[in-house]
Amino acid sequence: MRAEEKNMVERIMDTETMGYAYEYPYGGGARKEYMLALTPENLANFIGARGCEAEKIIITDIADRLVVNTMFGMLDVCPDQKLCRRIVQHLLPIQMGEKEAGKVLAVNRNVSNQYFATTEGVPFRKKRNHGELPQYLIRDNHEPIISREEAEAVRKLCAYRKEQQCVENTEVYQNRYAFSSRIRCGVCGSTFRRQKIYIGKPYEKVQWCCHKHIQDRKVCGQKAIREDDIQCLFTRMWNRLAGNYEEILIPLLAGLKAVPRDPKQEKEIGELSHQIEELRKQSHMLRQVLVDGNIGSAVFIERRNQLDSELETAIHRRQLLEEDQFFEQEIMQTEYLLTVFRSRPARMEDYDEEAFLMIIDHVTVYPEKRVQFCLKNGLELEESLEEGDMADGRN
Ligand SMILES: [Zn+2]
């Protein structure tokens, strides 16, 4: 271990806030692990310096409790809101390009492990279980740290700066692949990550593999699936569906529209109809009373206005309830899918990424190369790869 590395470990420990960072690069690849100081300023420097280049960073304390995580450079979950505000205070100027990220107190995890292995009595030598980590990642369980608009502005700025800095290496920064976070593991439920195999060989290939399987194959036994296999299955599914989409989607749409509303809503509609009828009767009576000359016109007008306003509210509310469909989202998406298939050729020769993005919500991969495509309206269609299907005859 070099002297400056040892020195850095000791500086981190001097802050009495040490923890770990797990950085997941864009587009897969091995995650990087660091030991670092968890002071707000250091966290801001660490995130600010690499936030845009990492798809995700998870920072935990030494007991593996989540301190903060980031998605595409933005703070995502930070259970301690006070700490969170202090990180943001330091991080925003960095993300907005107003100042550079300061020196980061962090070392590669190997260095800190080496340090602790050679030091007596350090109380932090806790064995990590990689499989446990995701349990801390509960999204959306807190107030947003910065508003959506601010986040979007920062994200754009970040993207712009990257564009300026690394024009020759843009691929790294724009690669949200069509399959990123859209492929789920049918065994353990986690998402698939992109991997390259046979790198540098003429037959270099891309495959997608369960995140948990990559971390520890004992946790999930799901095998990787090649990207061209998924593409081939998608093309096949598309051709099957596009050939007779009307027979499938039109009855589905009718079915969705026929689903009765929530009984509570039905009850409210009944009550509103009764109320509307009553108000109309009263209004009619009031007119009669006026004709008979028993009531002053000012009093009449006030009462009539009141009745009219109540009537209008009730009618409006009933209309809203009547328009409210139980499967509104699914109905909309099914109508959308019908338009997609109407406007596209019935047969797809080669995989078409645009078509994939248009109709697919997510894909679940099961063992034996069984793949389930979930369309945007929730419709699930399964395809599987037989032995003979593989274009290049591999097994
Ligand atoms: Zn899995």
Image (cartoon, grey):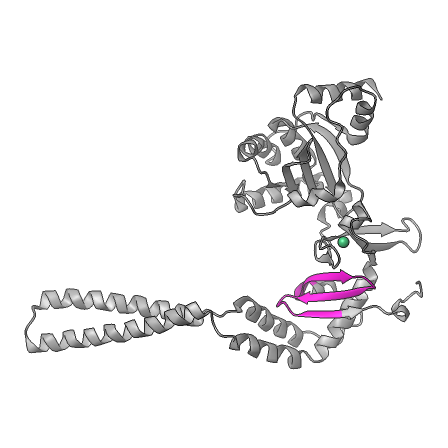
**Is residue 72 something that shows in the picture?**
no
Q: Nearer the viewer, residue 339 or 227?
A: 227
Q: Is residue 72 left or right of residue 365?
A: left
Residue ID at (58%, 73%): 335
Q: Is residue 219 left or right of residue 90?
A: right
Relative to residue 188, is residue 269 depicted above or below?
below
Task: Say whether residue 374 is magenta.
Answer: yes
Residue ID at (89%, 68%): 387
Q: Nearer the viewer, residue 97 or 78?
A: 78
Residue ID at (61%, 68%): 377
Residue ID at (82%, 24%): 117
Residues drawn in magenta: 357-382
Residue 261: x %, y % from top left: 47, 71
Q: Name the image quarter holding residue 269.
A: bottom left
Residue 177: x %, y % from top left: 73, 54
Task: Say whether residue 3 is magenta.
Answer: no
Q: Quadrant of ligand 1?
A: bottom right
Residue 324: x %, y % from top left: 46, 69
Q: Name the image quarter holding residue 11.
A: top right
**Is residue 357 something that shows in the picture?**
yes
Residue 1: x %, y % from top left: 85, 22
Instruction: Name the main secondary structure of what is drawn in magenta.
Output: strand
Q: Nearer the viewer, residue 305 or 279?
A: 279
Relative to residue 68, is residue 217 depicted above or below?
below
Q: Name the image quarter holding residue 347.
A: bottom right
